[in-house]
Each structure stands twice: as structure tokens, then as C-alpha cells.
Image (tube, rainbow, N blue to C red):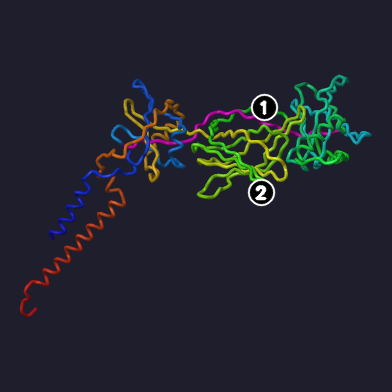
Amino acid sequence: MKSARWLCLCLLAGLSIPGSLNAEDTEYFKYSRLFEIKETDQGELYSVPLDSDVYAATRNGFPDVRILDGEQRLVPFQIRPIAGTRARLVRKTWTAANPAPKPLDNNGMEIRITLGKDDPAPGGLRFITPLTNFEQQVQVFAIKDGAEHPLVDDALIFDYSQFMDVRRTEVALPESDTREFRIMVNMLTPEQESELLELSRSLKGGTEEGRTEKTTILRRPFRIDRIEFWTEHSEEIPDANIVQPWAVSDLKVTQDAKIKETHVEFKSRREPLMSLKIVSSGRNFSRRAEVQIQAGLKWETIAEATISKFQLGDIREEHVTIDVPETRHDRFRLVISNGDSPEIPVDAIEAVGTQYQLLFLRQPGQSVHMVYGSKSAGVPQQDTAALSYALAQKVNPTLTTLGVQSENSPAITRSIDMKSLLNNPVVLGAGVLVLVLALGWGLYNASRRIDQMPRVDGD
């Protein structure tokens, strides 16, 4: 029984001796930050935008972030995207009613359209056509009080599917009170054909040989299924996530001539990125591109799109932004497929992503600080009912900022809370095991003593 008592005493002594910090203690979190809160500040709900230092040191989902008070107790908090009001353009479209088309001798077409009584003043029109690989000149005239006035002269609509994924079938209209229009769709002028021929050469990406030139744009009657008018207005989006630019670094551009690809590698500080814009001094290109992240020794594709950019006189089309699912990673690679075309220069990468904030309740005069950066800490079990209620009631938080990041010393310790230990399944399991062993040892010794007792005659 002495051995059993000795094991129990060891167990109790172990529970009372200060030891290594658990997941709620600063020893497991590499960094700490103070909040820039004034002593006279009487606010209770606080908001703190996270910065690149926090993103770089924390894991996805922020399980390794804590707010502690002066006695190292957990202060309930939440991390969520910063929401605000963002403006966006909303387009309304409607089909032109009862258009009056009239074929022209040069394979062109004249169309007269009168707006309906309830139709708003259009900001532009769009031709709905099934055709591809075409170029057409468009003129728009306003008819008012029997007189005709030019609204749009020498606009171009086109489709270059043979060369690149570029198509434009819209014509913007200047602001006016016109209710009746005459639209002319004609073949191109010689000057426009010359410019577009130069563009087609550039898009092909090959080298010309000899003196024979061949146009690949098909000449055929232009078919129009219908014409749509459109108008745009600005609309405020409430509670929209706010985005901001995030810097990338260590941009490295290499060419793989064997597989005809351009590789663009760069780093981020694990900010939550949502889109990447390719800044290029090149023009007149259309390429397939993939965004990848480094997963071990391999690269994993997270998004792909066609990037394009062309410039022809006053016509400019640019689609060089690739949307990605919100991603926090430190190494990225952009892969651009060139085929037989020349490589395009990549001068920079501009990244945009979500901005997150940390929200917490603080009592006046309470000392609080933030710790973060742990490889093993799990999501804290915290009571956020009061915080959630305050947010649901649209209480305006007091905006504060983070102080200078400091690195915690591994030697930081504090007394282990008995309740925390008893709720720890590892400690509880070890305690039960020790007690079972002690009980087994006691029963074993008791059975030995019984065997050693003198037997009574007749037993």
C-alpha cells in the first residue's frame, strides 16, 4: 500500500508543479502585440485591422490567434472580413422593339428604331449576332423633328476568334434625349482595313515571308438576330467585403522554350489574395494562363483564365486580371502558354485581396494584448455571445491599431490552472491510468498478504 500512496502523491505533486504552457499560454505563440488604446478611451467594442505581420505568422483560418488580459486569461474575440459600402455599376438591358431593317448595296444594312414610351434614354446598344470572325463599321444618327444628327461616327464592332478571345459588339451612345435612331452597318473603310490587317499580323505572332498578304476575315452579309439597348447606373452594395492591394516580392520571370511557356514566380506574406493583375508593356496578345501555389515539391493550379490585351488606334481592350479563390500562401507561380507566339513581357504583378479585422470586447481600464503564431494551437473554445450580440445590434466599434510586433521568450511560464488541467484529456487520461495502476498494485499486494496468512484447520 505504501507504493500506491507514493504513486498518488506523485500524481498530485505533478499537478501542482508549474510546467510547460498549454495552448492558451504565450509560450506556444511566437509573437505578441499591444493595442494602441488610449487610457481615457471608454469604448467597449474594438476593431483592429490585421496587417501583413499577422498574416505572415498565422495559419489559415487563424486558429493560432488569442487576445489575453493582464492575467493571461482569454478575452473573447472574432476575426471577420472588414465590410463596408461599395459602389458598382448595374446594367439594365432591353430588346429594341419593331426595328425596321433595310439592306444596302454594299452588303451593309440600315436599321431604324424608335424607343418605346417607357424606355429610358439608352447609354449604348449591342448587336446580337451568331457570327464570328467579322469586322463592321457602325454609324448612329439621331432623328428629331424631321432632322438627322450624327451621334456616333465610324465605330467598330468585331470578333477575332480566329486569333484571340476578343469580341466587341457594343457601341456607346452619348447622352441625349433622342427617341428615334438610324443605325448604319457597313463594310470597313480602307484605312480601317489597313489597321486591322496590321493587328491580325501581330495576333498571329508569326514571321511574314514573301510579299503575298492574305486577309482571313470573312466577307459576308452581316446577320443580326436583334439589337439590345442598355443603360447603367451606380448602386451601393451594403455589407460588401472591402478589398485592398497587397504587395508581392521576389518577382522572377523565366522562359521554358521546350514547352513554350513563360513562368512568373513571386512571393507574398500570406495575405488573403483574391485576384492577380499582370502588368505588361506588350500588346496585341491573347494567352492562356494558370495561377499555381507551391504544394510541397509540386505546383498546384488554383485558377486559370485567358489574358489578353490589344491596342488599335483609339480601340483598347485589356483583360489581364485573374480571379482566384481567396488564398493565403507564400509562394505563387503564373504559367503563361505561348504556343508559337513570342513571349510577352511581364513587368509586375499587382495583387488584391480581402482585409480582415479582429473584433473584441474590452472593459474600461482592462489591459489586453494579442498573441499569435503557433504551429499546434487549435481553435479556442470561447464564449462570444455578448460580442455576437453587440455586432448584431450594429454597435459601432472603436477603431484601434496594433503596436510593434515583439517575439515572445520561450522561457515565459505561469502556474498551470488546475481546472484547465483537469479538463485536459491527456492529463485526465494519464491520471486515470496512474490510479488504475495504483489500484492494481494495491490489490496485488493484498492478495499476497492473504496467501501468506496462516491457514485455519478445516478451511
Task: Find numbered disc 1 in the image and state the secondary structure of the residue it sits on.
Answer: strand
Q: To which residue does mark 1 refer?
A: 233
Task: List x then y, in percent, for residue 409.
Answer: 32, 37
Tell me which corner region of the image, top left, top right, bottom left or bottom right, holds residue 156: top right
Indicate which label's residue lies in the foreground, 2 or 1: 2
323 left or right of 131 in image: left
Instruction: Give the residue type that dot 1 points to.
Output: His
Instruction: Give the residue type that dot 2 points to.
Output: Lys
* Residue nearer the viewer, 261 or 169: 261
Q: Is residue 424 above or below residue 215?
A: below
The answer to whether residue 69 shows anywhere in this view is yes
Q: Please identify the residue farthest to the bottom as the structure is shown.
A: 458
Tell me which corner region of the image, top left, top right, bottom left or bottom right, holds residue 313: top right
Q: To which residue does mark 2 refer?
A: 258
Q: Name the magenta segment's main secondary structure.
A: strand
Q: Is residue 178 above or below residue 391?
A: above
Q: Is residue 74 magenta?
A: yes
Residue sitting at x 83%, y 34%: 136
265 left or right of 122 in image: left
Residue sitting at x 32%, y 33%: 69
Residue sitting at x 42%, y 34%: 389
Q: Please identify the residue farthest to the front as the structure is shown.
A: 210
CA gap, disc 2 and disc 1: 49 Å
Which stretch is magenta?
73-100
Task: Find numbered disc 2 in the image and state the secondary structure of the residue it sits on.
Answer: loop
105 left or right of 114 in image: right
Tell me which corner region of the image, top left, top right, bottom left or bottom right, holds residue 316: top right
Task: List x then y, in percent, for residue 416.
Answer: 26, 43
